[in-house]
């Protein structure tokens, strides 16, 4: 983590601390001084742990850019739900379950985790395992163009998912 600029560490820490404290306020809802002090201590511990376990060098997600892709995300979610429901209620539809390996361009980290989450909404596929270069997906129908769909999703989300350097 030493190759990460100090401002990047500070930015990541500040954003995470604000999010953890906001979560604390939602959970506590009392705003009593003793509870706020405990919330600040819990926020500091959560932020330190977060920065230690997932340093900012592991990539990031551009939330504003990702929000622009929300209509695509919602559409894929709807199509996936309909596809799975059709297959569940219509036994004549083909089911060829199995596993497909997708060679992902994102290194492990936040950006790759976000891609796995997004891609889990593709019709009939869910990530099940990964290596450094490959994500394994379980598919309801391996004869479908799953790898092509995953590549299209990765290209569509490339601006929002910023890979970083792998941390050990």
Image (cartoon, rainbow, N blue to C red):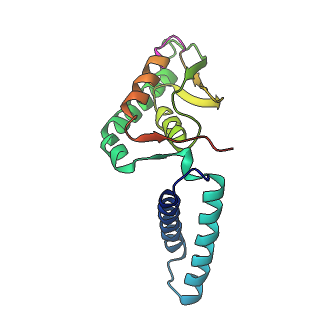
**Where residue 57 appears, x then y in whole percent?**
55, 48
Nearest the camera: 103 or 121?
A: 103
Is 80 displayed left or right of 125 in the figure? left
**Location of residue 122 (image quadrant):** top left
Nearest the camera: 87 or 63?
A: 63
**Where residue 11 appears, x then y in whole percent?**
47, 61
**Where residue 3 appears, x then y in whole percent?**
58, 50
Q: Is residue 11 above or below residue 4?
A: below
Q: Main secondary structure of the magenta part?
A: loop
Q: Is residue 145 magenta?
A: yes
Residue closest to the far right: 168
Q: Is residue 15 above or below residue 162?
A: below
How many numbered dots are placed on residues in this image? 0
| Residue shown at 54% from the left, 40% from the top | 113
| Residue shown at 53% from the left, 35% from the top | 116
**Where residue 25 appears, x then y in whole percent?**
50, 74
Q: Is residue 136 above or below residue 13?
A: above
Q: Is residue 96 above or below residue 168?
A: above
Is 65 displayed left or right of 93 in the figure? left
- Give the magenta part as a residue range: 142-146
| Residue shown at 58% from the left, 25% from the top | 137
Q: Is residue 150 magenta?
A: no
Is 159 displayed left or right of 109 in the figure? left
Nearest the camera: 94 or 68?
A: 68
**Image quadrant where one finds the C terminus:** top right
């Amino acid at each position: 983590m030493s190759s990460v600029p100090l401002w990047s560490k500070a930015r990541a820490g500040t954003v995470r601390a604000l999010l953890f404290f906001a979560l604390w306020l939602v959970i506590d809802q009392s705003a009593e001084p003793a509870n706020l002090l405990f919330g600040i201590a819990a926020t500091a511990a959560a932020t330190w742990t977060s920065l230690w376990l997932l340093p900012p060098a592991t990539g990031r997600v551009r939330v504003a850019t990702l929000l622009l892709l929300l209509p695509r995300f919602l559409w894929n979610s709807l199509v996936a739900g309909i596809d799975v429901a059709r297959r569940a209620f219509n036994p004549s539809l083909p089911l060829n379950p199995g596993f497909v390996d997708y060679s992902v361009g994102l290194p492990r980290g936040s950006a790759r985790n976000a891609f796995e989450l997004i891609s889990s909404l593709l019709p009939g596929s869910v990530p099940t395992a990964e290596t450094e270069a490959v994500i394994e997906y379980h598919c309801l129908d391996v004869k479908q163009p799953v790898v092509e769909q995953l590549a299209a999703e990765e290209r569509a989300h490339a601006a929002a998912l910023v890979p970083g350097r792998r941390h050990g």
